[in-house]
Amino acid sequence: MSFLAIALGGASLYAAFLYGLHVLFTRQQGARLAVGAVFRRRLRKHVGGIWS
């Protein structure tokens, strides 16, 4: 196996690893943002009920 083939294989493995991390992170962020939006809506309704 040539050095070029090994280097390309390593680079593609590294890229796939980074892409996997990115997908996991964006999924978690999406869920967290959705939960945060629901929480803020509830809090706003609750606080609005107290002060109005």
Image: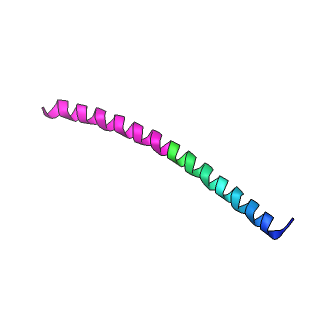
In the image, residue 34 sits, relative to residue 2, either above or below, namely above
Residue 5, horizontal then vertical, whole percent: 79, 64
Residue 38 pos. (x, y %)? 35, 34
Q: Residue at x 70, y 58 (%)?
A: 12
Q: Residue at x 66, y 53 (%)?
A: 16
The image quadrant where one finds the N terminus is bottom right
Rendered image quadrant of residue 33 = top left
Magenta part, dominant SS: helix
Residue visible at 81% across and 69% down?
3
Residue 34 lies within the magenta run: yes
* Residue at image coords 24%, 36%: 44
Residue 26 lies, with reference to residue 45, above or below; the image says below
Of 15 and 48, nearer the camera is 15
- Tell me if 9 is positioned left or right of 29 in this view: right
Provide the residue span drawn in magenta. 28-52
Magenta segment: does it hold 9? no
Q: Give whichever of 16, 36 is nearer the camera.
A: 16
